[in-house]
């Protein structure tokens, strides 16, 4: 048993060192492997399978709203990137450039896409002519490169996978509707599939996307009380359209600029999944997104009938659930540890006594609870358990979020809360960037969002004592 427990023992406890716990989980649960390029990771089968499930579900939800997938080039000519001033300023510090083709110096540098607004705009300028072709609702699944100085798997990588939706509309009203529609779609997806509750709101002007008119965000709260921006949706208005001359002739044959949006969710969300649900034994995956929902483990592989019976159940359950069985000669204890580390929501054990009693022993990953289930009710009961695990994880995360939102009426109170209570602090704000900068410099907390659900906590901005305009959620963030 000595060697068997090691895999779990090597995980640092969350309360001891949360950052180290995170690193332990992503590597020991075999989600990623570090590559030879700094800041770029290899997604191992379990890590990639989580992304595939996210992608599959999200892609279906996108398409239900009329979105179509396209694929644009990896490289962007420099002159295109330069066209929208705010956009290029925002991204210039983290762009990687291709300057050589073979041995030849290129006459124009090509950047590796950090995001593809400019390519989509160039494309839209070519293909949009009439109001009849609007709206254009395109999305692409791809990877992008941002030259980050400090990197962490999933949370901040030099190269990462994501989807970027880019739409073009006849009116700003329609574009705004689409921006919010996609934000709501992301929020619902996070809650329903990932069991992660989120706060919806608008970014401040300082925190908005380079080139956007408004940026909307969903913010989630991690176990350690830090916030994580989980997806964003941007309204561009006609700023990019003017820079790229994307025009259509309206019903009266008058040329008009299109109004655009973009919206994205990346593998960063896997970091949220880990940090919201995981515990000191490893990952905990919500059943709806788990690549494997049920792990079948024989307690004595040599005992007659056990493996045969388990194989029967493996075949039966596989018709309805994502199932894996481990018939290897590793000990049951080792297999339990592995299943816990990988976050597989439910374990079904079959031992000699279970076989005698015509039952299996189910063990929930989220609570550790053991339940004996007669063969006669197995399929139904397993379904109920998986549903209950999904619900319980969301409830638990909801409670964690509610319990970590604080309210500050004075700046003193705010500073004290940020320093002593991990979580999010609500405070009024005058909408001036100076106050926002001061708060960030003095407390390390950034404005997470101006939530859609506004409250009035006072008349004045506690920092400058001028008239307050908005209530803002502040917090330390990944
Ligand atoms: Zn102020």
Image (spheres, rainbow, N blue to C red):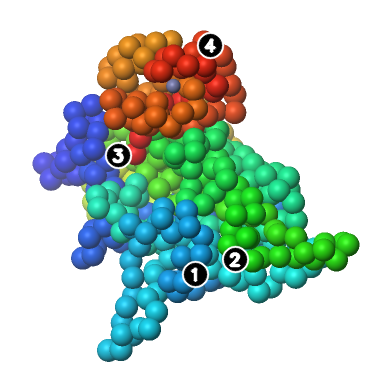
User: Could you tell me if residue 215 is visible in this image?
Assistant: yes
**Label 3 to label 1: alpha-carbon separation:** 45 Å
**Label 3 to label 4: alpha-carbon separation:** 46 Å
Judge whether 320 appears above or below 459 on screen.
Answer: below
Task: Find residue 342 and report its horizontal and vertical position in percent.
Answer: 34, 46
Q: Nearer the viewer, residue 225 or 371?
A: 225
Give the position of the N terminus as an image quadrant.
Answer: top left
Q: Which residue is mark 2?
A: 244
Furthest residue toward bottom: 103
Q: At x 88% / y 62%, what residue is drawn?
A: 252
- The reply to whether the C-beta atoms of the residues labelled 4 and 2 are less than 8 Å apart is no
In terms of secondary structure, where does tag 2 sit? helix
Which callout, 3 or 4, points at the residue further toward the start of the chain? 3
Which quadrant would residue 223 be assigned to in this image? top left
Q: Nearer the viewer, residue 274 or 430?
A: 430
**Picture disc at residue 282:** 3
In terms of secondary structure, where does tag 4 sit? loop
**Label 1 to label 2: alpha-carbon separation:** 9 Å
Q: How many marks can you see?
A: 4
- Check disc 4: other Cα within 10 Å, few if <14, some if 14-19, many if 20+: some
Q: Nearer the viewer, mark 3 or mark 4?
A: 4
View quadrant of ligand 1: top left
Which callout, 1 or 4, points at the residue further toward the start of the chain? 1
Q: At x 39% / y 70%, what residue is drawn?
A: 111
Q: Which residue is mark 4?
A: 459
Give the position of the C terminus as an image quadrant.
Answer: top left
**Label 1 to label 4: alpha-carbon separation:** 46 Å
**Label 4 to label 2: alpha-carbon separation:** 43 Å
Furthest residue toward left: 2
- The answer to whether residue 449 is left or right of residue 134 is left
Q: At x 43% / y 66%, what residue is drawn?
A: 113
Q: Which residue is mark 1?
A: 80
């Amino acid at each position: 048993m000595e060697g068997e427990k090691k895999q779990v023992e090597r995980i640092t406890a969350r309360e001891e060192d949360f950052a180290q716990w995170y690193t332990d989980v992503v590597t020991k649960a075999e989600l990623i492997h570090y590559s030879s390029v700094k800041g770029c990771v290899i997604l191992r089968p379990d890590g990639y399978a989580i992304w595939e499930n996210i992608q599959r579900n999200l892609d279906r939800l996108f398409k239900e709203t009329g979105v179509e997938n396209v694929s644009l080039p990896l490289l962007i000519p420099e002159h295109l990137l330069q066209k929208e001033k705010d956009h290029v300023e925002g991204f210039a510090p983290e762009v990687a450039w291709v300057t050589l083709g073979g041995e030849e110096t290129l006459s124009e540098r090509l950047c590796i896409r950090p995001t593809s607004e400019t390519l989509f705009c160039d494309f839209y300028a070519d293909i949009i002519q009439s109001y009849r072709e609007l709206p254009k609702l395109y999305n692409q699944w791809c990877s992008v490169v941002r030259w980050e100085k400090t990197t962490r798997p999933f949370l901040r990588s030099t190269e990462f996978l994501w989807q970027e939706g880019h739409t073009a509309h006849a009116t700003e009203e329609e574009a705004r509707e689409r921006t919010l529609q996609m934000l709501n779609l992301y929020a619902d997806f996070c809650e329903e599939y990932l069991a992660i509750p989120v706060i919806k709101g608008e970014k401040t002007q300082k925190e908005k996307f380079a080139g956007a008119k408004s940026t909307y965000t969903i913010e989630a709260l991690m176990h350690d009380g830090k916030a994580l921006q989980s997806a964003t949706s941007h309204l561009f208005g006609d700023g990019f359209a003017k820079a790229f001359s994307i025009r259509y002739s309206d019903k009266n044959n008058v040329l008009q600029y299109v109004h655009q949006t973009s919206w994205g969710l990346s593998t960063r969300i896997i970091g949220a999944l880990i940090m919201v649900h995981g515990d000191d034994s490893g990952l905990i995956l919500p059943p709806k997104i788990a690549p494997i929902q049920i792990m079948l483990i024989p307690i004595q592989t040599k005992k007659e009938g056990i493996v045969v019976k388990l194989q029967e159940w493996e075949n039966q359950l596989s018709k309805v659930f994502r199932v894996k069985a481990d018939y290897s000669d590793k000990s049951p204890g080792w297999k339990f540890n592995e299943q816990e580390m990988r976050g597989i929501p439910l374990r079904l054990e079959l031992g000699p006594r279970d076989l005698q009693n015509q039952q299996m022993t189910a063990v929930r990953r989220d609570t550790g609870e053991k339940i004996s289930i007669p063969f006669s009710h197995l399929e139904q009961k397993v379904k109920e358990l998986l549903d209950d695990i999904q619900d319980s994880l969301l409830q638990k995360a909801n409670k964690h979020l509610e319990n970590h939102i604080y309210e500050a009426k004075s700046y003193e109170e705010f500073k004290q809360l940020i320093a002593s209570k991990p979580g999010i602090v609500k405070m009024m704000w005058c909408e001036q960037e100076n106050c926002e900068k001061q708060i960030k410099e003095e407390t390390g907390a950034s404005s997470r969002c101006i939530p859609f659900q506004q409250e009035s906590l006072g008349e004045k901005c506690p920092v400058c004592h001028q008239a307050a305009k908005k209530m803002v959620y502040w917090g330390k963030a990944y």
